[in-house]
Amino acid sequence: MNRIEFMKELEYLLQDIPEEEKEDAISYYRDYLEEAGEDHEEQAIREFGSPERVASIIRSELMGNLEEGGAFTESGYQDERFKEPNYQVVKHQDLPEVQENGWQDGKNSRNPEENWSRGGQNGGSQDWHTSQNQRDDSNWNARKQDYVDRTWFKRLLKVGLLLIILSVAAPLALGIGGTLLGAAAGVILLLLGGVLLIGVLTVTAVLGAIALLVAGFGLLFTNPWGGLLTLGAGTLVLGLGLIGIALSVLIYGRFLPWCVREIVAFISRLFRNGRRKQA
Amino acid sequence: MVFNTGAALLDAIVLAVVSREQQGTYGYKITQDVRDVIDISESTLYPVLRRLLKEDCLETYDLAIDGRNRRYYRITESGRAQLNLYRGEWHGYSQKISRILEEA
């Protein structure tokens, strides 16, 4: 397998990952093989193993679980999962149509290529993806076209269904949505009111406690019992004030910043999603 | 090498290799430089470089060489901080291991 075949195959295998990631990975490996030059190219491709293996490594890192897998062994750094020929095949992302039973773990298979092929990228049950060796170019292109057509058709179908559902459900949804929105606004206002109230009550309690304690202390000399009673009342109010302070610290120091963070994160997520869809 | 170590050491070696080049260096050369020290497969480094980029330890820029783009990797400030952390950890760790092995 030469450099061009290898890259073509890798590109084909990565067509379902996010465009940006795919381009980064493809250009990295293409550059790598170009830098390797003619002398080293063959060795580099041999060490890559197969396009399937490289695609697996890229996918695996995308899913964020590569970091834990590797270790230095007698022969240097290795990741057990990607040792030929028993590397683990990583499932395609963003393809919910793929049936679970179409996938094989790859652990017990002698031949990773056959194993990968059997995974099937268009639904698993159909075995249109036969052995790599039998694959000629026109066949490959036809299959790719077939795959692209199918995904397009599926996408169209989904949009159509969504439109129908929306047009039927819109009037109902608007009513329910309005009520829900009103209720949500009510709850939020109530929460805000409560939060403010706790702050105000705390300040009042602390100030009141100080006033009562000072007054009680003064009274002690003229009217000992009255003074003691006032001091007691002051202490009680002070206790309430302290509880209020603890609550305020929790609410103003933790809960409110948390709310703000969550809201900001939510909004920025919305924006990012929107941008990705446009791209 | 007979000893097993985690992926952090590979991160440290890659950061060290990249930090040696003021102007940055590129994927193929990083791989060959790391291979001078430890035995890694040619395909190992892409995920590592990608992760270090995501963690802002490295940055990239493209430069036209021989009529095509070559992507250069350069260490960032936080990459240097991370490398220093690894260096300190490694220093303490390797000293302790050396001591116990040579005392015995």
Image (cartoon, rainbow, N blue to C red):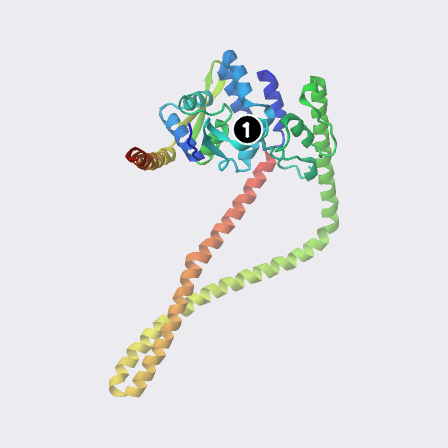
Element type where label 1 sits in the image: loop
The relative height of residue A224 versus residue A109 in the rendered view (above or below) is below
Q: Residue at x 69, y 23 (%)?
A: A131
Residue A136 x %, y %: 70, 17
Is residue A133 among what the camera can see? yes
Q: Residue at x 73, y 31 (%)?
A: A150
Crowding near pointer 1: few (<14 within 10 Å), some, many (20+)? few
Q: Chain of mark 1?
A: A
In the image, taking residue A86 as reference, residue A163 lies left or right, namely right
Q: Residue at x 55, y 40 (%)?
A: A272
Question: Residue lying farthest front?
Answer: B104
The residue closer to the viewer here, A214 or B56, is B56
Residue A23 x %, y %: 56, 27
Question: Residue lying farthest left?
Answer: A221
Instruction: Please state the total of marks drawn on the protein image.
Output: 1
Image quarter in which the N terminus of chain A is found: top right
Residue A65 x %, y %: 53, 38
| Residue position for label 1 | A83
The relative height of residue B6 versus residue A38 in the rendered view (above or below) is below
The residue closer to the viewer here, A75 or B15, is A75
The residue closer to the viewer here, B47 or A46, is A46
Is residue A99 among what the camera can see? no
Question: Residue lying farthest top?
Answer: A39
